[in-house]
Amino acid sequence: MEIEGRDFMNSPPMKTVRFGGNVVDTLAKFKKGDTSDYELLKHQLADPDIKDAQIINWLQEFRNCVTQLSKDHEQLIYTVLRLPWLGRSPAVVEEYLAFLSNLVSAQTVYLRACLKMVVSNFIPKRVKICEGGVDFSDSDDENENLPRTFDQCHQALQVIAKYVPSTSRFLTPILTEHFPFVQKSSRTLECYVHNLLRMSVYIPALRRDVLELIFSKMLKLDVSAPREEIEEMEENALHQEVKGGEQLEEGLFDMDEDVSDPKSSAPVGACVMAHPVADRLDTLMTVLLAYIKDICHSNGILEVERTKEFYKDLVCVFDKLILPTHASCHVQYSLFYLCSFRLALAEAFLEHLWKIIQSPTQPPVLRQAAAGYMGSFLARAKFLPVATVRACLDLLLPWMHLYIDSQDSGTRAYCDISLHGPFYTICQAVFYTLIFRHKSILEGNMKKGLAYLQSLNLERVVMCQLNPLKVCLPAVTNMFAAITRKYQLVFCYTIIERNNRQVLPVVRSSIGGDCVSTNTNPLDSVFPFDPYMLKRSGSLIAPLYQVWEEPAETEVHSTKRVQRCSAEDEDDFLHGETPQMEGVVGMTPGSYESHLRSPSSVGSPPIAFLQRPF
């Protein structure tokens, strides 16, 4: 030990002094009933100022007697697991990882405790400043060593998974238990989700469970940020920025700038959502889309087999969580983004939706949701060629005609949503698709395009006794009527005017009394791929997205029957027409039974996602 040049009187004692015997002797005394050294050992291990050399010495001794560390020594092991090993010297980290490998191999009873210790470090520590018993500061610790800390956590998990192949079965409930509350900061949620996704790379058996957990939490955020609220708060924020700019020009300064909201110092146009929940969701969507891109690509080249496997997992999550969730606005774009990588993926997704739509064993609400997804995807996915759109129409229209054949001569041949809900939703999906895609069908060869549209026999659908125009959204009905009239495919206005003269479905006012209002959305329609509103993650979606192009005055029948949207709306002729229902997560996510697969080898190709800085 070096003592030369050390001022003994003015320097604290070096942390190398140990009291009591070694660990083996201490355990032997404990077995005989003498707990004095045992308690002293726990006290020394819990010292917040413990040094690297001490930690290494203790861990080496524990490794030498790991077979004796039965469940009787649970409290002692918990104290060891709380040692501050993260961020220490490489020697400490290496010794601690060796201790973990020995412990879980010899004493599997501590597997859960080891996993909980690692997972608890997946988020930044909280920094609290307290005065007079009052916490007036509580924020994330933006330690520059945070990436290294996370790297060491993943090293620990990989070591444990190597020695205990069934680790994935024990991890799922622990990951769920430690998932931060969705109202926590964006930074906390970002770190935890990033680490979960990173973990799914080297423990592939966990991937589906991890995706389910993440999507279930993101859907809760999504349905808590309705489209109208996001639009309203963005407009208010823009108004405040403009107003603030005018005040600055007039020389009116805020004298309390130092204590104002941090967001107020952000430059105009900064990519921060005014809606706090939407901002957290935007952060998570950015992480998720980056993960999807990197998991499917290697050095910029699409890995087909890896992408296929990931697509299967994501579709399972879609069926279990996304499809049954009403009025989610953004989470479903993860599948939209994945499908843009390769046409075969988009066609597989459309085929999957088609199977749900035509399956009589599926609940009607899911069949209708699937039809909404299909119509919205066909309309909005810019990467879909017209041949794919036509192929889907060639599936939908014959089904509609067969349905009309089966109902027109029966006793149920009348307009009733409860009886024919899937049929009406499919009709609306077809109308919506044609509104967006009729130009691409007709361009190139107008004659062939018109012949194809005429072959769909849309007139029979519109004129049938089931009367789909009566229950479709007015905006869809009016635009469809205008387009089909322009090309002389169907004349819908007679039907629309007759429907308007009839009594429409009504709902009573929620405040009671005789006041009633017309229900303009009896199908409770939601188009899942309506315009994407999140700013940061939206940069990845925008190039793939077909925005609504307002037709010229001369292009459609310019009468009051066609409802025009305001020129201020950048997208969506449906703006203001579709009541946004309060989102409800349709299914509580449960853990899938783990399909155990062997963890990937150490030499597996690196995923760029893992190297993204925090």
Image: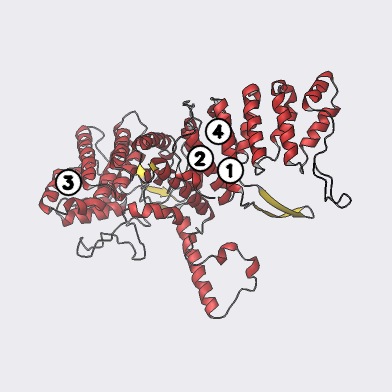
Classify mark 1: residues with Cα within 10 Å, few (<14), some (14-19) or many (20+): many
Which of the two discs, 1 and 3, labels the residue nearer the N terminus? 1
Dot 1 falls on a residue whose secondary structure is helix
Residue at the left extreme of this rendering: 447
Q: Residue at x 56, y 66 (%)?
A: 265
- CB under 8 Å between discs 1 and 2: yes
Q: Secondary structure at mark 4?
A: helix
Residue occupied by mark 4:
158
Secondary structure, mark 3, is: helix
Residue wearing tag 3: 459
Q: Nearer the viewer, residue 127 or 68?
A: 68
What type is the residue that disc 4 sits on?
Answer: Gln
Does label 2 or label 3 sit earlier along the sequence? 2
Q: Are marks 1 and 4 in contact (CB under 8 Å)?
A: no
Q: Tell me the distance, in whole angstroms, between the alpha carbons under discs 1 and 4.
A: 12 Å
Q: Quadrant of the N terminus?
A: top right
Alpha carbon separation for disc pair 2 and 3: 53 Å
